[in-house]
Image (cartoon, grey):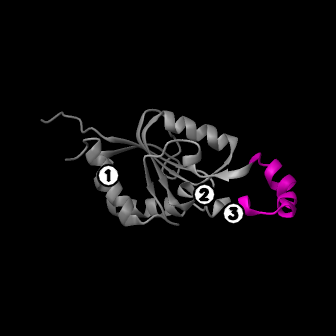
Amino acid sequence: MDTTVQKKLRVGWFTFTCCEDSTVIFTELLNDHWREWKKLIDFRHARVLKSQNVLDELDVAFVEGALSSQAHIDKLKEIRQKSKKIVAVGSCAVVGLPSAQRNTFGPEDIEAIREPYLEKFKYLPKVLKLAEVVKIDAQLPGCPMDPKQFLKLVDEVLKEFKIIS
């Protein structure tokens, strides 16, 4: 009887300010890849998949969305600290847009949203892309991300971390 334990890639999937379209693509890809990935990937943190999540030592953190609050910045810094590799996923994470559209608002528009949104939800004066706060190791642009590019990147990191050859 073979008792060797398969080493697994420790992964987190995180979402900040965005429409979560890449999360939808990710979960759709699980329909075709779950049997294969469950042998290779330990989804440590993925709220879309499970209610009990752990943010500890990760090999790869996939992070979707722009940063709208100090709480987002603090969480992203924690993710960076606990991850060997961070992948910015989707347009909001990579370039900030479309979530950062309010960065282009004039003074009247900002004043109109100040109390009901900016102050109520403790939003920052400016929406930030991930690279403005932490080092990003890879990116998957698009709104949503391209599923083929995501699958290619998953294959690359599985090889990089010696999960497969």
Does residue 55 appear in the picture of this structure? no
What whole-number distance in Å separates the C-alpha atoms at marks 2 and 1? 30 Å
Decide: is 145 above or below 88.
below
Q: Is residue 165 magenta?
A: no
Q: Residue drawn at (46%, 64%), measured in percent from left and top?
A: 145
Q: Of the residues under marks 2 and 1, which one precedes in the sequence?
A: 1
**Closest to the observer: 14 or 85?**
85
Report the magenta stretch's main SS. Answer: helix
Q: Of the residues under marks 1 and 3, which one precedes in the sequence?
A: 1
| Residue 142 on image: x %, y % | 49, 65
Q: Residue drawn at (65%, 60%), measured in percent from left and top?
A: 99
Q: Is residue 138 left or right of residue 125?
A: left
Could you tell me which secondary element the residue under label 3 belongs to? Answer: helix
Where is mark 1, residue-wise? 37
User: Given the image, on which type of amino acid does mark 2 rest?
Assistant: Gly
Where is mark 3, residue-wise? 101
User: Given the image, on which type of amino acid does mark 1 rest?
Assistant: Trp
User: Given the image, on which type of amino acid does mark 3 rest?
Assistant: Gln
Where is mark 2, residue-wise? 96
Q: Is residue 157 left or right of residue 116?
A: left
Q: Is residue 119 magenta?
A: yes
User: Which of the two marks, 2 or 1, is nearer to us in this view?
Assistant: 2
| Residue 9 on image: x %, y % | 34, 42
Report crowding for label 2: few under 14, some 14 to 19, many 20 or more residues within 10 A (C-alpha): many
Q: Residue drawn at (49%, 42%), measured in percent from left and top?
A: 135
| Residue 151 on image: x %, y % | 34, 60
Image quadrant where residue 102 sits: bottom right
Span of residues in magenta? 101-124
Q: Are marks 2 and 3 in contact (CB under 8 Å)?
A: no
Report crowding for label 3: few under 14, some 14 to 19, many 20 or more residues within 10 A (C-alpha): few
User: Which of the two marks, 1 or 3, is nearer to us in this view?
Assistant: 3
